[in-house]
Image (spheres, helix red, strand yellow):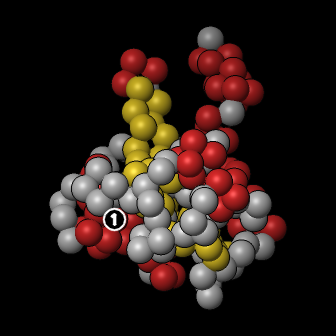
């Protein structure tokens, strides 16, 4: 694997500009439902979680696809060949991270392919919450730091500090 997206949830405001940038770049529509990145919000708990393909080394979506439509491209990025996809949804069920969906218009699987190394979501994020990083150990550390806010230990420590 060559590259992946690191998302810092502490910087994410939930503005959904990344979804709009992605859908525009990928489908030429201004439609977040067709985006390859999703922002999940729980307003009652003040939680905002960007969801995107993690480019897993052992990708369950690949094994679940009966037609072989999901493969690693020449950049090492997991890619969906829509001509080969039958829209069965096996990949969606197999992905435990929520990184792949069925496009509501084409009824085919869609997932982040890192825009061939120039992700639209990164450009659309005014808050610099999304970053394209390599696959070195320090890049994985930066990715883990970006999601540390979601860790139960961190949340517990944060609440204890408030009291």
Q: Nearer the viewer, residue 84 or 75?
A: 84
Vertical relation: 1 (above or below) 13:
below
Q: Nearer the viewer, residue 48 or 126?
A: 48
> Residue 101, percent across and down?
44, 51
The residue wearing badge 1 is 22
Vertical relation: 37 (above or below) 46:
below
Q: Residue at x 60, y 59 (%)?
A: 65
> Residue 73, percent across and down?
60, 82
> Residue 18, percent across and down?
35, 59
Bin the neighbour count of mark 1 within 10 Å (Cα to Cα): few under 14, some 14-19, many 20 and up. many
Q: Which residue of the protein is positioned furthest toward the bottom in this rendering?
A: 74
Viewport quadrant of the C terminus? top right
Q: Is residue 155 left or right of residue 11?
A: right
Q: Which residue of the protein is positioned furthest toward the right in this rendering?
A: 137
Please identify the quarter of the rendering in which residue 6 is found: bottom right
Residue 25 shows in this picture:
yes
Q: Residue at x 46, y 65 (%)?
A: 85
Q: Is residue 77 left or right of residue 56?
A: left
Vertical relation: 27 (above or below) 103:
below
> Residue 90, percent across and down?
56, 48
Q: Residue at x 74, y 27 (%)?
A: 153
């Amino acid at each position: 694997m060559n590259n992946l997206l690191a998302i810092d949830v502490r910087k994410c405001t939930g503005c959904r500009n990344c979804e709009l940038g992605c859908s525009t770049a990928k489908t030429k529509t201004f439609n977040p439902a067709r985006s390859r990145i999703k922002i999940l919000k729980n307003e009652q708990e003040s939680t905002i979680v960007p969801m995107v393909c993690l480019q897993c080394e052992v990708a369950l979506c690949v094994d679940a696809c009966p037609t072989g439509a999901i493969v690693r491209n020449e950049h090492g990025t997991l890619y969906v060949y829509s001509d080969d996809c039958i829209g069965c949804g096996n990949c969606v069920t197999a992905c435990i991270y929520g990184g792949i969906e069925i496009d509501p218009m084409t009824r085919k699987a869609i997932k982040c392919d890192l825009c061939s190394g120039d992700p639209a979501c990164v450009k659309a994020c005014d808050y610099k919450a999304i970053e394209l990083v390599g696959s070195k150990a320090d890049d994985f550390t930066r990715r883990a730091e970006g999601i540390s806010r979601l860790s139960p230990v961190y949340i517990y420590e944060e609440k204890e500090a408030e009291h």
